[in-house]
Amino acid sequence: MTTRALNRRVFLAAGAVVLASGGRSRAHNGTIHVSIENLAFVPANIEAAVGDRIEWTNRDPFDHTATVKGGWDIVIPAGQVATRIVQAGDTVEYYCRFHPNMTGTIKVR
């Protein structure tokens, strides 16, 4: 078998693998970054898969929370980072307990 024929077979096999996988790969490493700055969650609305990690980085000079009414409550001190692993049923609206005008949504896909 010539080198050209071998290269063509490898290329076709690799193409078949890509097609079988739907041609998609994860856009991130499973960590979704949300910055808290100027009294806002940035981005305010995110999508995540079960098992992804949401990481809030508080860039403001005062404490915030990521709170779900009747659900979880995460305190994020000034200048610190807090995380949560996305679970089934985590499609929620959340807010900061200290600054209720700060809101965000998490949509689990």
Image (cartoon, helix red, strand yellow):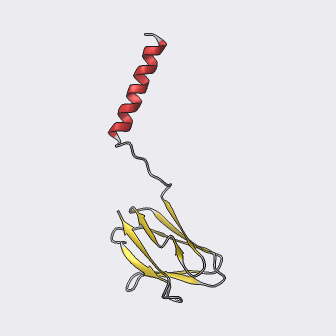
Task: State which quarter of the image contains the N terminus.
Answer: top left
- Residue 91 vs 7, above or below: the answer is below
Task: State which quarter of the image contains the C terminus.
Answer: bottom left
- Residue 108 vs 99, above or below: the answer is above
- In the image, residue 15 lies at what x, y percent? 39, 32
Q: Residue at x 56, y 83 (%)?
A: 64
- Residue 74 vs 19, above or below: the answer is below
Q: Is residue 58 left or right of residue 13?
A: right
- In the image, residue 59 lies at what x, y percent? 63, 75
Question: Extreme top residue here?
Answer: 1
Snapshot quadrant of residue 104: bottom left
Snapshot quadrant of residue 78: bottom right
Q: Residue at x 46, y 10 (%)?
A: 2
Q: Nearer the viewer, residue 71 or 38?
A: 38
Q: Nearer the viewer, residue 29 or 87?
A: 29
Q: Residue at x 35, y 32 (%)?
A: 16
Give the total of numbered labels: 0
- In the image, residue 11 lies at what x, y percent? 43, 26
Q: Residue at x 50, y 55 (%)?
A: 29
Q: Is residue 103 left or right of residue 57?
A: left
